[in-house]
């Protein structure tokens, strides 16, 4: 009986720790998107509606946004090779500041399906 109670408490502890803090939400809007089927390029402009002050927060937003965009187009792409360009900017005192862009190759070759980072030019001002 003690083992069952101990394992139950351990499981509950792990679950509660894994939940984490969900209160850190940032509004991100895709302001422009284009698809050039001749050149196999998807291009997105993303506006972060919060002033980001550290690289780790910026990287988290970039990674989450990239994953969401890729998830939304992956079924349409299938196994074809495409380039994904995402330009990021953020609002600071009601003005838009460019943060740069990130470029991925989707389905680079048979051994690298999915996203392959080509170039990361994103940095805080």
Image (tube, grey):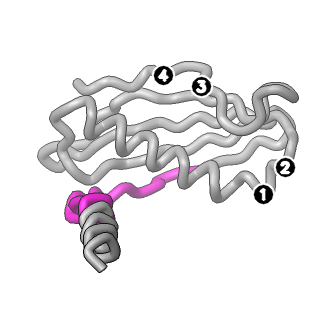
Secondary structure type for disc 2: loop
Query: Which residue in the structure is indicated by mark 4?
Result: 120
Mark 4 touching mark 3, by CB under 8 A?
yes
Query: Which residue in the structure is indicated by mark 3?
Result: 117
Query: Which residue in the structure is indicated by mark 2?
Result: 78
Question: 113 or 53, which lies in front?
Answer: 113
The residues colored magenta run 15-33
- Which residue is drawn at the image coordinates 26% and 69% (left, top)? 6
Residue 25 visible in the shown view? no
> What is the CA distance from the residue labelled 4 to the residue labelled 1?
25 Å
Residue 101 position within the rendered picture, expressed as x and y whole percent measured from the top left: 47, 29
Query: Which label sits on residue 75?
Result: 1
Mark 1 touching mark 2, by CB under 8 A?
yes
- Callout 4 crowding tier (Cα within 10 Å): few <14, some 14–19, many ≥20: few
Q: Is residue 18 part of the magenta span, yes or no? A: yes
Question: 32 or 13, which lies in front?
Answer: 13
């Amino acid at each position: 009986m003690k083992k069952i109670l101990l394992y139950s408490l351990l499981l509950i502890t792990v679950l509660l720790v894994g939940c984490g803090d969900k209160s850190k939400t940032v509004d991100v809007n895709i302001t422009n998107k284009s698809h050039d089927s001749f050149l196999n390029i998807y291009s997105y402009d993303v506006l972060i509606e919060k002033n980001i002050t550290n690289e780790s927060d910026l990287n988290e937003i970039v990674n989450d946004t990239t994953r969401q965009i890729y998830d939304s187009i992956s079924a349409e792409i299938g196994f074809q090779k495409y380039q994904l360009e995402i330009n990021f900017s953020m609002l600071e005192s009601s003005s838009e500041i460019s943060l740069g862009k990130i470029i991925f190759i989707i389905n680079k070759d048979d051994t690298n399906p999915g996203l392959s980072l080509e170039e990361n030019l994103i940095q805080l001002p």
